[in-house]
Image (spheres, helix red, strand yellow):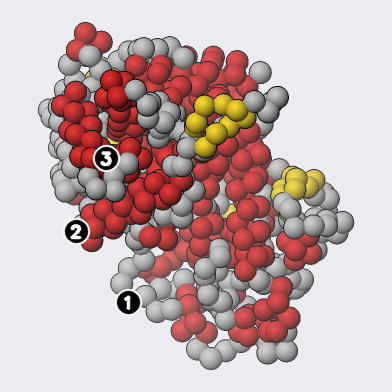
Amino acid sequence: MVTGIISTALRLGLAALAVALPAAGGLAAYPDPAIVTLLRQQCGTCHCDGAAEGSIALDALLGGQTRPPAAGEQASAEQAAWLAVWRNLRCETMPPADEPQPTAQQRQLLVQFVERDVLGVDPARPDPGRVVLRRLNRVEYANTVRDLTGLEINLLDTLPADDTGYGFDTIGDVLSMSPLLVEKFLVTATVVAEKLVEAAVPVIGHDRSGQPLPLAYPKRIRRVFAAGPRPDNKTERAAHLTTTVRQLAERAFRRPVDQATVDRLVNLAQQTDDAPGGTFEKGVAAVLTAVLSSPRFLFRVEAEAAPDTHAFPTAVPLDEFSLASRLSYFLWSSLPDDKLLNLARAGQLRAQFPEQVARMLSDRRSKALVGSFVGQWLQTWDVEKLPFDLRAIAGKAERKALEKSFSRSLRRSMRLETEHLFAHLLRNNLPVTDLLVGRDTFLNEELAAYYGVPGIKGEKMRLVSLDPASQRGGLLTQGSVLVVTSNPSRTSPVKRGLFILENLLGTPAPPPPPDVPPLEAAAAGGSLGMRELMQLHRRESLCASCHARMDPLGLTLEHYNALGQWREDETIDTRGRLITGEEFTDSRELAAVIAGPRRRDFHRCFTEKLLTYALGRGLEYFDAPAVDRIVADLEKDGRLVTAVLGVVGSVPFQMRRPGPIPTAAVPPPTVFKGTP
C-alpha cells in the first residue's frame, strides 16, 4: 500500500519539474490599483501615512520599484522590508489578531503580489537555487566508509565536529576543509586501510552439506574485493586487479571513473604488491587509502544531465548519478548502493524513483535520517550532554535522589523516545501531526517510571499507548524537548516558546536587542512566580512585542520542571494565546491548536526544515513555490511519507542552476529568516 502511495504522489511531484527559470534581474511591475488599495486597507493604519511600525512604511515602498535580490548579495533595506511583509502575510502574523483580517482569498492575492510583482517569483518558472560543492560531514563520512568497506570502525571520535548552518550539519556553505581536517582524513584513510588488510584473509568456506568451497574473503569485506581473491593464473591477474580497482573506485566516487584514473590506481596497487612484503591485499588497501583521500570521495561532485534532456537553458536536471547521491545522503547519510548506481548507469533511476524511495525508507539505513534530522531539528542531540544544577532545581534534600533518577541512561531514553516515535510514523506512513497530538509513544522501564507511567518493564524501548488522563503525549511533553529548552537551574519559558515558534510554527522571533537585562534582574530580590517575572521583564518596550509571541507558549509548559518532571502547583497559570488569536489553557490544548487551526503553519515549518536538511542550503524567497507545492500535497493527507516524497520530487532537489558549482568559499546566499 505504501509503495502505491509513494508511486502516485511522487509521479505527481516529478510532473511539476517541466518548468523553466525566470530571467535574472529586472524591475518589478506593480499591480493594478485594487491590490495597492487592499494593501493600504489591511495594513495602512500601522504602515502608511507616516506610520512605520517595525520600520515598515508601505506607502514609501509602494512609491518605488524594488529589484529582486540577486543570489549572494546582501539585501537592501527595501528588499528586506518587502521580504518581512511577505513572511508575515504568509504566516498570518499580520495584520495582528485584534485587527480586521483579510479573507483567505485577499491574503492570497497580497502574498502573490509580493512574490510575483515585487520579488519576481514565478511559480511556473521556478529557480532551483544555488548549490555549493559539499563536503561529507563526519557522520556521512563514517557511514560511507562503513558501507564502502564493510568494516565496523568508530570514526566519529577521530574527526572534529562539523559546523552547522540553519540548524543542520549538512549545509554546504559551512562544511569547509581546513589543513587540520585534511590531515585527519589522511590519517583516518590509513587506519581504515590497515584494518582492511587485517580483515582480508581468504578462508575456505563450506556449503550446507559440508563440502569445501573455493577460497573467499570474509563476507563483510567482500564489497571491496568484488572479484574475489587473486587468481593463480598470472595471465588473469591483470584483468582481475583492474576489475577490483574499478569497482572500488566507482562505488567510492559514486559514478563511473575515467580510464586514466583507473590506470593510476592499478599502477599504485601493482607497485605496492611488488614491493618487499607486498601482497595483493596490501595493494588494494593502498588504492583504498588514495580513494578515501580523494576530493572525489570527500566532496559530493554533481553534474548536469546530458544536454539533450535540458528542456530549458536556465534550469538543468541533475544527472542520475548525482541524483542517486542526493537521494542516498538524504535518506541514509551514506553512499548509493549498487541498486541505485546500476539504475543510474542504465538511465532508469528517475523512472523507478517511487519504488526506490519506498525501498530505501524500509531499509535499516534510513535510521540515519531519523537520528540526524530529528536530532538537529528538535535538538535532541543535546539532551545527553547539557549541564544542570540539580541542587537549584530540586533542593539540597532531594538532590541525591534526583542524581540517581536523572541518569545518563535516562537521558538517552529521552532521546530515543523522540527518535523512535518519528521512525514509527515514517515506517507506518502516519500523519506528521501525530508527533504533537498522538497518544502513543516509546518508553522503557526507567523512562516510564520517571514519567509515572505504570506497567512498563525492561530496558528495551517499546510502543506504549498512553492513558487519556496521562500528562504525557506528544513532543511538547517529552523529556527530550523539555530538557533541551531549559536553563541549567530552572525552566525557561523564553527558550520553550522560541523553540515552538522556530521548530513547530515556523514563525521565529528576531534576536533580542543588545544589553537586555537577564530575567533574574527583573525580580529585584523578590519572590515571584515565573509568569510575574516575565511580566516585569516585558516592561522593556524593546522586549514586549517579541515576548508577546514567545512567553504564552513557554508558560503553558510550566507544569514541567527543567528536567521534564511533572509538578503539581495550583498557582501555575498555563493559559495563553497565539499571536494569531487562538487560545489554549494547557500544553495539550496548545498542541491541538498547532495540529488543528495552525496545521498549515506546522506543515510548512516541517517542510522547510526537511527541505533545508535535504538540500544542504538555507531556503530563499524563490523556494516558496516548491514549499507551497509540498505543503499543498501534505494538507491532503498529512502523512509523513508525503512530505519526504514532496522533497525528493521537488525542483530544488531534482535540478540546479546551469554552470560550474561554486565552492563553500563563495559568500553564502541572502537568506531571510523570521520577521523584524
The structure residue drawn at horizontal position 36% and vertical position 12%, both measured from the top left corner, is: 346
Placement of 588 over or under 236, stated as above or below? below
Left or right position of 37 against 328 = left
**Percent x, y of residue 279:** 32, 41
Q: Which mark is residue 515?
A: 1
Q: Amino acid at mark 1?
A: Asp
Q: CA distance from mark 3 to mark 1?
A: 66 Å
Task: Name the residue: 65% across, 45% down.
Answer: 421
Q: Quadrant of residue 412?
A: bottom right
Crowd rating for badge 1 (residues with CA inside 10 Å; few <14, some 14–19, many 20+):
few
Where disc 1 sits, the SS reads loop
In the rendered structure, find residue 273 and report the number of the disc placed on it. 3
Which residue corresponds to the image point at 49% horizontal and 32% vertical from the top-left?
A: 216
Give the position of the N terminus as an image quadrant. top right
Residue 639 position in % (x across, y down): 60, 30
Q: Residue drawn 57% across and 26% down? A: 213
- Residue 615 placement (x, y as % from top left): 35, 37
Q: Residue 414 or 359: which is nearer the viewer? A: 359
Closer to the chain start, of discs 1 and 2, is: 2
The amino acid at mark 2 is Pro
Q: Nearer the observer, disc 1 or disc 2? A: 2
Marks 1 and 2, how far apart at CA: 38 Å
Image quadrant holding the C terminus, namely: bottom left
- CA distance for labels 2 and 3: 31 Å
User: How far from the left and from the top, in percent, is residue 5?
Assistant: 59, 18
Amino acid found under the numbered disc labelled 3: Asp
Checking the image for residue 179, the label placed there is 2
Between 613 and 100, the one nearer to me in the picture: 613
Residue 174 visible within the image:
no
